[in-house]
């Protein structure tokens, strides 16, 4: 996702630039295998995706009173993609989508996610730098 944000800011908003990089992040997060059961979005986790998305799906079942992270992530990924394409490019919206996905990567559906996230952000030191691909991808 970090590469997509950088490419978008650099004006590479055609489908082979920033949107392509964002799609790569989505493929890593969700997976690129057809689910063996279901539609890959509702019902039980299929068990064959082996991805962070499927992990979050399983965690959602462990904490049924919380936000369904796996279903919340898809519109966020789509929002980021839409705001990276061509004349629709909007840096603030892309940054918002990226930040929200990082929150998802950090808390993984834990019921105390806000406390964990805030604690982690308090400890994060931007002077140490961030890996080229971003914080969570």
Image (tube, rainbow, N blue to C red):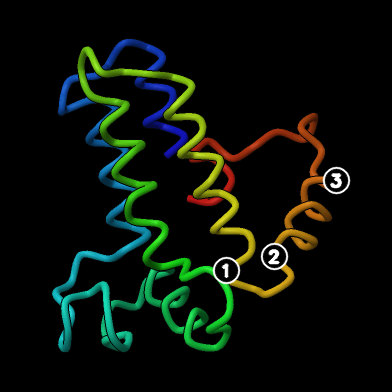
CB under 8 Å between discs 1 and 2: yes
Whole-angstrom CA distance, mark 3 to mark 2, is 14 Å
Whole-angstrom CA distance, mark 3 to mark 1, is 18 Å
Is 66 above or below relative to 101?
below
- Which dot, 3 or 2, sits closer to the camera? 2
Residue under pointer 3 = 122
Front residue of 122/60: it is 60
- State the image quarter where residue 58 is shown: bottom left
Residue under pointer 2 = 113
- State the image quarter where residue 128 is shown: top right
- State the image quarter where residue 99 is shown: top right
Helix, strand or loop for disc 3 = helix
Q: Horizontal and vertical percent for residue 79? A: 33, 39
Helix, strand or loop for disc 1 = loop
Is 60 above or below relative to 12?
below
Tell me what residue is drawn at x 36 percent, y 36 percent: 80
The quarter of the image holding the N terminus is top left
Is 122 above or below relative to 60?
above
Task: Give whichever of discs 3 and 2 has the lower sequence position.
Answer: 2
Query: Which disc number belongs to residue 120?
Result: none
**Mark 3 crowdedness (10 Å alpha carbons): few <14, some 14-19, many ≥20:** few
- Which dot, 1 or 2, sits closer to the camera? 2
Tell me what residue is drawn at x 58 percent, y 83 percent: 63
Q: Horizontal and vertical percent for residue 135? A: 59, 45
Residue under pointer 1 = 108
Whole-angstrom CA distance, mark 1 to mark 2, is 8 Å
Task: Give whichever of discs 1 and 2 has the lower sequence position.
Answer: 1
């Amino acid at each position: 996702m970090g590469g997509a944000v950088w490419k978008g800011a650099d004006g590479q908003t055609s489908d082979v630039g920033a949107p392509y990089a964002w799609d790569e992040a989505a493929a890593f997060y969700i997976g690129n295998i057809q689910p063996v059961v279901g539609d890959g979005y509702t019902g039980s986790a299929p068990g064959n995706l082996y991805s962070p998305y499927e992990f979050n799906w399983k965690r959602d079942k462990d904490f049924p009173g919380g936000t369904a992270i796996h279903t919340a992530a898809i519109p966020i990924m789509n929002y980021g993609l839409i705001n990276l394409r061509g004349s629709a490019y909007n840096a603030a919206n892309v940054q918002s989508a990226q930040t929200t996905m990082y929150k998802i990567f950090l808390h993984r559906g834990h019921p105390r996610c806000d406390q964990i996230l805030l604690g982690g952000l308090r400890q994060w030191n931007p002077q140490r730098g961030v890996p080229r691909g971003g914080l969570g991808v």
